[in-house]
Image (cartoon, helix red, strand yellow):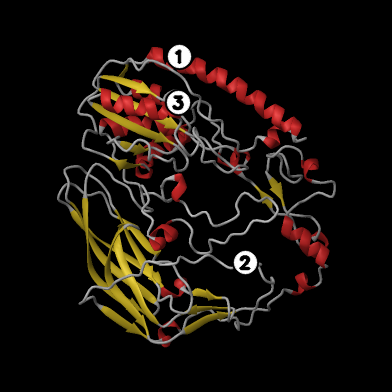
Amino acid sequence: MNAYEKAHLKKLRRIAPECTLFLRRNGDFPLKGRGPLALYGSGARHTVIGGTGSGEVNVRHAVSIEEGLTAAGFEITTGAWLDAYDRVRAEAHKKFIARVHAEAKKAKQLAPIYAMGMTEPEPEYELSLDGEGDVAVYVLARISGEGNDRKAVPGDLLLSETEIRDIKALQAKYQKFLLVLNVGGPVDLSQVPEVENVLLLSQLGSETADVLADLISGKAYPSGKLATTWAKASDYCSVGTFDEEEETEYREGVYVGYRYFDTAGVKPEFPFGFGLGYTDFVVKPLEVSCEGSRVCVRAEAENTGSFWGKETVQLYVSVPGERIDAPYQALAAFAKTKELKPGGSCDVSLSFDLRDHASFDEKESCFRLEAGRYILHLGTSSADTRVCGVVRLAEDVVLRQVQKCCGEPGFTDWVPENPRQAEVPEGTKEIVIGAEALAAAESPEDGTPAILPEIEKLSDETLAKLNVGGYPEGGLLTLGAIGNAASSVAGAAGETSRAAEEAGAGTLVMADGPAG
């Protein structure tokens, strides 16, 4: 291994724990020492370090979690279980491949194209959970990627019956039990509410296993936050026609992710922005101010626990929403503290431009800041915030006037029947600003022509080709394999059309994914 590769991996191992977090914890971890450890689950030996397709990670060798824990000094006592699972997995994989080829043939597609992004479900099995020691770790793994949506079926978004059974049994059997999620996206954990320690390890590249060993042994601590909302599969917003290939209607409008859960009053399992480390924090607002259109909040974060750690302070804003429908709140800014020892504290500053929270007015075809109260919420997740201030805009401000050019969509966006409303406690500081504070808003009259002369000369057919990329006249399959789909640079994933080269528009090569 080259020196720069070693340096890269060393740095990755140091910073990757900041991407991990506990969904639940009871204080059993980190462990005080190393000793016997019972290791289970598909991710123990088949650790997932990245996704499929453009998320794939190609390395000479990636350490498995079993190897990483062994190297860290733990004695793995479940070799027989892991061997037996490998045999079950190998047989299930053969059947999966055979099924994919049969389905691809029936669909008259090439198997590699048909299977792109497809998830192989976890197999069902009956294996005895024999293992020595007081500590058990179950590594639940999922892989996903481009080309296919994840499905709310056992072994994918849902846990399989085998996983539910084994996880519950291990929680009851062992003195200390840790469920590790080696996943690239949410899984529905509603079937295992009794598990007291759940670590979202995620998929951290080639250092994934060693990072877990550092976390369990206390050499490192988690300090990440959820970038998605984790909920029961049945609780997600489902108003769109996502399963229709020819006519997909995105009727959920602005109510995607936490905006839906917060506004509709649906409680998720784990909210957006949530994440626990080995310690606890208290966040207090100190000062709210405005400089032109920029809103600034200064806060203090204090480590009130008994372990070192970092906290991510988050600032959300509720817009008036009187004329234009809007979600309960939207993330406006966030900041991570420095490393804080037990009892330590520090100030963090968060700021955002009020203009970034303008709403699109469909009736008037403009981006508008409504007059009224912009309520500021400070906290550590979208479900754990407190009102810390209010900015009142004295009058409506139109930031940009645009023109409707795409016709009518044929449907209207969904709106919650009884949306949650932000309440402002008495005595909350309020700052009033006028339209002059937004004077620096972007103007279309800046001297730049709307359409460059070179573009004006191109035909509609040429412009269409530029917009769809390097689509060949012979059809998509003439491109060859993904990762070898460019004629300018070998191994690239694609390139823009050459249709406008005579007008001076060269090609843009997409160095996408592992091939890039």
Q: Residues within 10 Å of mark 3 (few under 14, many from 20)?
A: many
**Which callout, 3 or 2, points at the residue further toward the start of the chain?**
3
User: What amino acid does circle 3 point to?
Assistant: Ser
Which residue is the site of mark 1? 84
* Extreme residue toward the front, this view: 417
In the shown orientation, is residue 99 left or right of residue 256? right
Give me the C-alpha separation between circle 1 and circle 3. Answer: 11 Å
**Which callout, 2 or 1, points at the residue further toward the start of the chain?**
1
User: What amino acid does circle 1 point to?
Assistant: Ala
Residue 502 in picture, x, y percent from top left: 83, 62
Out of 451 and 334, give the one closest to the viewer. Answer: 334
* Extreme residue toward the left, this view: 343
**Element under disc 3:** loop
Q: Which quadrant: the C terminus?
A: top right
User: What amino acid does circle 2 point to?
Assistant: Phe
For residue 504, say whether it is visible. no
In the shown orientation, is residue 464 left or right of residue 76? right
Which residue is the site of mark 3? 42
Residue 180 in picture, x, y percent from top left: 36, 33
In the shown orientation, is residue 495 left or right of residue 265? right
